[in-house]
Amino acid sequence: MPTKETSLNPPRNHVAPLLVQKFQHDYEEIMQHYTLLQQLEITEHLLSLVQLARQEGVHSDQFWHQYKAKDLALLKRYGKTLKPYVSKSFHAYFYYDTVLAQKEIYSSEVYNSLPGAEQSLSADEREQFLQLCQNVLDWAIHFLYLQKEPEGLEIETVTAPSIEEPDKEATRYRQLLTLYYLLKAGFQTEHRDNGNISDIVRLAHLLTGVKFTSLQNSDIYKKYAKIPDHKAGMQLLADLQYIRPYFTVLHMESAVALIDEDIRQHEKRIRK
């Protein structure tokens, strides 16, 4: 009877993902030894090696010539600080004939028991491994750049909006007096004639930004009910003369005429 074939542990279809996990683990360990800018440079270096392997194929002399040149250039820049990187032997990932043993995907016993062709990564396994490594490094670079300060950009300083100081001369009464003449001259709306003071008071609350609750609680209502006679004497004249120029510049002649008439009437009262 034929003997039952012993299954591999790990299964063969797990080989490429497990290699990528090893690669990622080695990568993450060395990153702890470097600054953000160094992490970016080393990550981009590793990505260039993976891309080179996909373009040239690791069995070509051209690949290893460029690989060694890239690693040497990095070593010259970093000197002894490159030891964490060197200790991980990233070059071993590209020796497809021995990587399963060197990176301990299979134990030495299992690896040596494999047929010669199965000790090496297949073409599909190589492509899967390189693609997954490239994905890991692409995402790592993206994440690192998100932590980096921008270069060559003028960062606009966001200043808090200035708080406009209230115009102390534009008193609440003067605001209401302005509304009174605006409605009377422009819309022939006079609260004492039309009996619609509550509606006008609500409008006054809106324009002055004062919350309306009820007529009984409204200070605006109390003032507007007597307007323009809420005040008298010199104070009323001062208020009328204050609001008059606003209507003049808008060429609201009818409003100006009403204000002028009230000024004359109150001046007569003062002289008496």
Image (cartoon, rainbow, N blue to C red):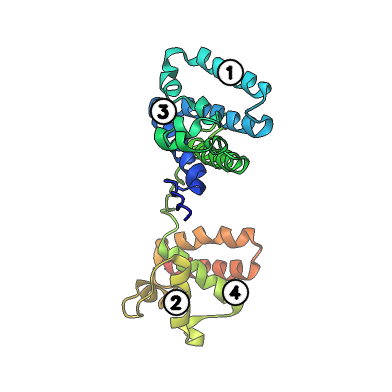
Q: At 62% from the left edge and 31% from the top edge, which residue is drawn?
A: 53
Q: Label 2, on which residue?
A: 202
Tell me the crowding category of disc 2: few under 14, some 14 to 19, or many 20 or more residues within 10 angstroms, Cα based. Answer: some
Label 4 to label 3, Cα distance in Å? 81 Å
Q: Quadrant of residue 272?
A: bottom left
Against 214, residue 18 (above or below) is above
Element at label 2: helix
Label 2 to label 1, Cα distance in Å? 82 Å
Label 1 to label 3, Cα distance in Å? 20 Å
| Nearest to viewer (mark 1 / mark 3) | 1
Label 1 to label 4, Cα distance in Å? 91 Å
| Nearest to viewer (mark 3 / mark 2) | 3
Q: At 42% from the left edge and 25% from the top edge, which residue is drawn?
A: 34
Residue 185, label in figure: 4
| Nearest to viewer (mark 1 / mark 4) | 1
Q: Label 1, on which residue?
A: 68
